[in-house]
Image (spheres, grey):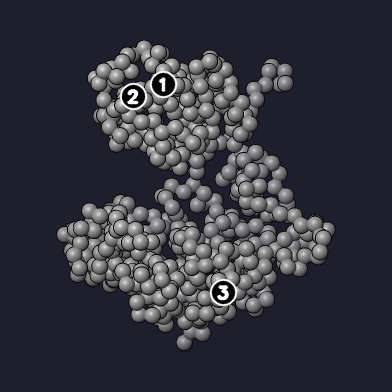
Amino acid sequence: MPSSLVSPHGGLLLDLMASKKRAAELKTQSREMPSWSLQPRQLADLELLLSGAFSPLQGFMARSDDDGVRGDMKLADGTFWPTPVTLEVTAEVGESLERGGSLALRDVEGTLLAVLKVEEAWTPDREGEAPSGPTCVGGKLEGVEAPHHYDFVERRATPAELRGQFSKWGWQRIAAFHTTSALHRAEQEMTFAAARDLEATLLVQLGVARTDYYDVSHYSRIRCVEAVMRIYPRHTAHLNLLSLAARNAGPREVLLNALVAQNYGCSHYLIRSTTPGGEDAVKKGTALEIELARTPERVYLPDGAGFVAEDAVPKGAEVKTLTPAELADRLAFGREIPEWFSFPEVVRELRRASPPRSRQGFTVFFSGLPSSGKSTLANVLLVKLLERGGRPVTILDGDIVRKNLSSELGFSREHRNLNIARIGFVASEITKNGGIAICAPIAPFDPVRKDVRAMIEPGGGFLLVHVSTPVEVCEKRDRKGLYAKARAGIIKEFTGISDPYDVPEDAGMTIDTTERNPEECVQAILLHLEKEGYIGRPQNENGA
């Protein structure tokens, strides 16, 4: 029986997976091919290409398609397409490729997922700049093995599978709502009302493409949305997980999300009234068969009216809102989340995934010149935190780590960065498992310090303490004579003398130990941690 669902973009839903026989041939041939290990964003794009969610694309874009899309949102053949879908590899890999050759695309474990027939490899010229950096590779794909997911597998339907389900359920008018966040009462009210007004059922497309492989909020976000799906009337709404990576492309991204929804069989795509570029997307969305529908946000009126559309709020009426930042703050400090804002099941899940800071792990990361006092402060802080108790505390001092974790490394910039990255990784594991890590390396370079922060913050707290003791004071304190050897040229690449130190501009605290003793400095750190909610003020024997 022919489907009554909206047609896929371009008229045909593609399936780029090779047959079993061809896949076996490709696996054998791939041993002689150059390989590329896909990054998380690239893996997400590959998954949507292979499944047909990016129909009518048959692979990663060649230069003519990329240029056309960046210009007037059209592929080289004139088909509407809003955003580039390109594959970037290192210049070294790009130089190994030839037109008509093949590139094996693998996951982080080396599993062959697809083979790309190289149509073109080029270094992009962005905004008139001289070509430099990564190489883009375009060409058609043959899928060998779709990226595999072990989590929430029943929620991960391909376009063909979901279209089959829609036909089985008798769904014809389907409104898609794309989100990457948990849903609360306002979003549930908004989507329910929008689908009702369109006389459509609702498909919630939850974007779950990860920016890294260790996204700790991934599972909690899915459980939150699953809980809300049970609030909708039976047989009126469905949740599907979608590996669609965020592109921060404004109205172009809205159009891409709508295009994917059309390929899944949806007739309408809901755009929140607060979505940046939403109006532009609606105007340009006429190039798609799916209908883009602007839907007003729902706001809460405490006078008993409950949630109403923002454009229907009576003049002068009191409106209650809770911003994402305010929600995060309430979670961090264990404060009440209003009942009108969210559902009890969602709040419980959020509190389980984001416990108050007083129960989270955190890292205190000291950075400063040699002999600035970092190790002394770290050891005093260790004692004070152990004295308080409640959480395990680990110290990762520069010299200790050099001996036990990085003994084979030298002191080149590359090796120093690798040493700091190792410290950051260990600290991130301690932090996300509820412990306290105290790090005291020199860490002279800003980029690797930022990398360490990015590793740690998703799993807990991070406090960068710049020990700003001047170099002349550090040199006077130097008991090992390292500064003297550096000035004599005996020690090369010595921070503060022959090698630079990037002064942190993002430090949470700056401490000069010249005129302050260690106890005073550490007390200031403890008071800051109390203010931020990571530790509580110790009680005396009477509980006061």
Is residue 152 visible in the rendered image? The answer is no
Return the mark for residue 497.
2
Return the mark for residue 471.
1
- Disc 1 marks which amino acid? Val
Q: What secondary structure is found at the residue carrying circle 3? A: helix
Return the mark for residue 420.
none
x and y percent of residue 78 in the render?
38, 80
Q: Quadrant of residue 496?
A: top left
- Disc 3 marks which amino acid? Val
Q: Is residue 272 left or right of residue 340?
A: left
Q: Quadrant of residue 116?
A: bottom left
Of residues 146 and 169, the one drawn nearer to the viewer in this rendering:
146
* Mark 2 or 3, closer to the camera: 2
x and y percent of residue 48 in the render?
40, 66
Q: Is residue 406 above or below residue 348?
A: above
x and y percent of residue 114 in the render?
29, 64
Asked if the residue at tag 2 contacts the one at tag 1, i.e. Cβ–Cβ closer than 8 Å, the answer is yes
